[in-house]
Image: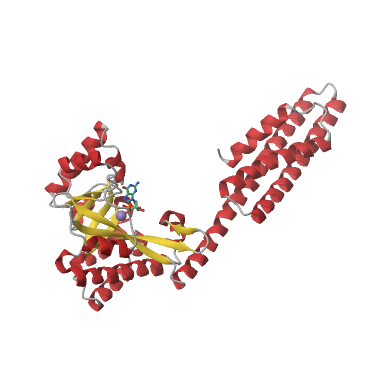
């Protein structure tokens, strides 16, 4: 429920118990009760600290009290008008209308304050998250986990996907969803993105030295905000030259949704990455309402079928969509990856449909580099 809806609901509930001859004290009590409900709603939605919660409560209560006083003033004007105008019905109606308007404004202003509070809180939270993430980058609290991707036919690990994690000093291991808004904001998108690429390339180089041709292909997720202006392309080109990783052992994944919206902004960089020999994959395939035009414009190597289709494979429609995605991918000579494979039944289905590569909790969760190194040394069973 929106804050405004919560305010209206609270006012309606409380107004039902209101005595007819409401006095200023009564109005204040109603306003305070509405404010408390609204503030509680804001506090719950924004998961505030105690100090911030106290401030929101107080601001909301003040707004509500002011609004209640305005409504009360309008009501007493209406009463006076009714008393003096006697026969003049139009004056009474006009005054009553104003009372109603003032009450509506009271609700509106209370919820408006609450909404502003909520917005401000999320802005403040984002800017403190940005500062904290910058610190995390300096203090080496960011790390990459890697999730292995398996050949459906041989069961061997053919690739890994690098996934960003934040070992937060008090909140524990955080997944990107908890800090993506800060990581993808204008201040950090380049430093965090560069760090991910650099770390992934260093790790891939290490596995390349240990395993040669059998080393897994390293996939890194990138967002459109990292592309454009050639920054990322320059970074990747330099890192590949400095390391002895063959460019084809690195791949970048970009979601179909972003390709659908921002393709013109990123076209030059995607072409340049392909020129460098870096592999390209469309991530979350099937969810981006895409024109598929980008499959013609760029040379993708892989498509990764979104896990929502894989988890819905018992459903006839999802199965049909998955089957046609696999057919499309195979017809275009792309490697088709199924993401989010969690059960043996799902694996059997994606195998039957002709997917080449399988990734998901059934095989392995994303794990620290040492765990993956150990896996790479084990013979496949
Ligand atoms: O959109 P993308 O494929 O980049 O998302 C990767 C995320 O999916 C990671 O955070 C990873 O932990 C998660 N993930 C990987 N395998 C599975 C799975 O089998 N099931 C679910 N629900 N999530 C998965
Ligand atoms: Mn991905």
Image location (x, y in percent) of residue 60: 69, 47
Q: Is residue 86 left or right of residue 374?
A: right
Closer-to-camera residue (47/25)? 47
Q: Residue at x 28, y 69 (%)?
A: 203
Q: Quick one: which residue is furthest to the right in this view?
A: 84
The answer to whether any part of residue 217 appears in the image is no
Closer-to-camera residue (207/85)? 207
Above or below, 222 against 2 in this view is below
Image location (x, y in percent) of residue 157: 20, 57
Image location (x, y in percent) of residue 251: 24, 62
Q: Residue at x 64, y 43 (%)?
A: 40
The answer to whether any part of residue 343 appears in the image is yes
Closer-to-camera residue (170/263)? 170
The answer to which quarter of the image holds residue 26 is top right
Above or below, 138 against 252 in this view is below
Q: Quick one: which residue is furthest to the top in this view?
A: 87
Image location (x, y in percent) of residue 128: 55, 63
The answer to which quarter of the image holds residue 231 is bottom left
């Amino acid at each position: 429920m929106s804050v405004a809806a919560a305010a209206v609901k609270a006012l309606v509930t409380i107004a039902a118990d209101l005595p007819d001859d409401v006095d200023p004290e009564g109005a204040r009590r109603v306003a305070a009760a509405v404010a408390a409900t609204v503030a509680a709603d804001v506090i719950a939605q924004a998961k505030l600290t105690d100090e911030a919660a106290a401030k929101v409560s107080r601001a909301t209560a003040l707004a509500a009290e002011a609004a209640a006083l305005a409504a009360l003033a309008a009501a007493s004007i209406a009463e006076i008008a009714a008393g003096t105008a006697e026969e003049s019905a139009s004056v009474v109606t006009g005054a009553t209308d104003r009372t109603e308007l003032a009450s509506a404004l009271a609700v509106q202003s209370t919820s408006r304050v609450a909404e502003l509070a909520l917005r401000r809180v999320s802005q403040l939270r984002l800017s403190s998250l940005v500062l904290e993430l910058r610190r995390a980058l300096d203090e080496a609290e960011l790390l990459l986990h890697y999730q292995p991707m398996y050949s459906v036919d041989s069961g061997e690990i053919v690739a890994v996907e690098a996934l960003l994690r934040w070992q937060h000093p008090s909140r524990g291991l955080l997944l990107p969803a908890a800090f993506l808004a800060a990581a993808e904001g204008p201040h950090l998108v380049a430093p965090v993105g560069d760090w991910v690429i650099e770390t992934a390339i260093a790790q891939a180089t290490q596995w390349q030295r240990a395993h040669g041709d059998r080393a897994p292909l390293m996939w890194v997720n990138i967002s459109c905000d990292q592309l454009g202006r050639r920054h990322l392309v320059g970074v990747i080109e330099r890192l590949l030259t400095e390391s002895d990783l063959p460019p084809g052992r690195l791949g970048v994944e970009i979601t179909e949704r972003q390709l659908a919206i921002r393709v013109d902004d990123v076209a030059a960089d995607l072409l340049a990455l392909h020129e460098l020999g870096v592999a390209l994959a469309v991530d979350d395939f099937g969810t981006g309402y895409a024109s598929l035009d980008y499959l013609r414009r760029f040379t993708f190597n892989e498509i990764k079928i979104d896990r929502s289709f894989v988890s819905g494979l018992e459903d006839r429609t999802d199965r049909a969509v998955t089957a046609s995605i696999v057919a499309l991918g195979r017809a275009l000579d792309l490697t088709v990856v199924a993401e989010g494979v969690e059960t043996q039944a799902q694996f059997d289905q994606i195998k039957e449909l002709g997917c080449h590569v399988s990734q998901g909790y059934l095989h392995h969760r994303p794990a620290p580099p040492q765990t993956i190194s150990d896996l790479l040394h084990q013979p496949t069973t």
